[in-house]
Image (cartoon, rainbow, N blue to C red):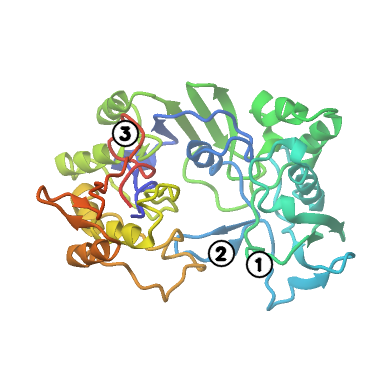
Amino acid sequence: MRRILAALALVLALAPAAVARETLTIGISQFPSGLHPYFDPEVVKGYVLGFAIRPVTAFDADWVNHCMLCTELPTLENGGVTLETRPNGTPGMAIHLTLRDDQFWGDGTPVTSADVAATAKIGGNPASGFPDVRTWGRVERVEVIDAHRVVLHLDEVWALYDRMPALLPAHIEGAIYDKAANPGEYLRGTAYNRAQTTPGLYNGPYRIAGYDSGSQIVLERNAAWKGRPPAFNRIVVKGILNTAALQANLMSGDIDLAPEGIGLTIDQVLTLQEQSPDRFDYAFHDTLTFSHIDFQLDDPHLADVRVRRALLMGVDRKAIVDRIYKGRAEVAHTTVPSGDPMAARDITAVPYDPAGARALLAQAGWTPGADGVCRNAAGERLSIVFQTGSGIKLSPSYSWG
């Protein structure tokens, strides 16, 4: 069952008057462990950095991929991506990237090919500690054409070549990396964790101007930003780690907005909407997150695909969505969200079919005994241990799927 909910709420607790304010105050119930865009991936960190860092490419609300730092999305069709043969004779791929000339880091330094090369150098080195080498780990060689044109030579043919993440500022992070003599030193020395308010770390509409770990992050307009001016002059992200206290702050007007997942829980959001439908603006959006159960295939009962399919058919996932999530989620039939361009359109959905589930179990040798519990010919009960996190009422990671 895919949650269309974990971002399911920017509970835009934006009171109408807040729109006219110069400062927007956001309450969060988690606090990022650091601010480096690649280390320790966290939803809350991605949320905060979304104000301050622009990636090379990104999907919009309609699931259409766009250039943010580049002039044109590279594709096979427009020649921005070409297939090539590597020196060892195996197939590779070249991504021809042209950066926009109106993008700057917060200290006024232009975003250039040097930043691409530095990010590939740092991200492609396993000793740097990047947990996600999906992009930079595939870059075998960087060919710098000029200040804004660069070619990334990949060590394989990759279907997701047009999904390019954030860059690191070469004049700051590249210099720190070059001074790191041993593995792990770059992580300890990165300015994102040691000097968070350094303007040159950020290329988005805001820069981080204040950082008090565990307490609050202050974002102010980035003077070097050349795009559309942001709506607020200042954003204050306050850490209020108790969700009940966070809701109280929202109700009292001490904060203007409480995102779901990293702020209020989804059940708090839905209850609040029922109790105060007109007091706040509530915005529900799609997310990449989905709830699921993973089967341990070394369990002899679950090794049989008929048993696994019967369990899926025996759970009314649509009823769960309607009952618990008030219908603001959709049932996931694959791990890829339905709006993603990579989603398969020809997959047959597994329906809720208790009779069909019983028939499949019978085929697998499991039939109900006198007590209604399924047993096999040896009299063994069909018993499965289910484990999940404790203390979590509703979560995209711990729900039926």
Secondary element at image label 2 = strand
Task: Please say if 126 is above or below 157.
Answer: above
- Identify the residue at horizontal 79%, vertical 41% (top origin): 170
Where is residue 49? Give x, y as percent.
Answer: 56, 40
- Nearest the viewer among 340 and 195 is 340
Which numbered disc, 2 or 1, marks the residue that appears first in the sequence?
2
Residue 111 falls left or right of residue 283: right
**Residue bearing the label numbered 3:** 392
| Residue receiving disc 2 | 65
Badge 2 local density, few (<14 within 10 Å), some, or many (20+)? some
Residue 33 in the image: x percent, y percent? Answer: 55, 28
Tell me what residue is drawn at x 30 percent, y 55 percent.
Answer: 329
Q: Is residue 147 above or below residue 39?
A: below
Front tag of 2 and 3: 3
Q: Horizontal placement of 241 versus 94: left or right?
A: left
The residue type indicated by label 1 comes to Leu
Can residue 6 be seen here? The reply is yes
Q: Quadrant of residue 254?
A: top left
Q: Which residue is mark 1?
A: 73
Structural distance between the alpha carbons of marks 2 and 1:
8 Å
Query: Label 1 near label 2: C-beta < 8 Å?
Result: yes
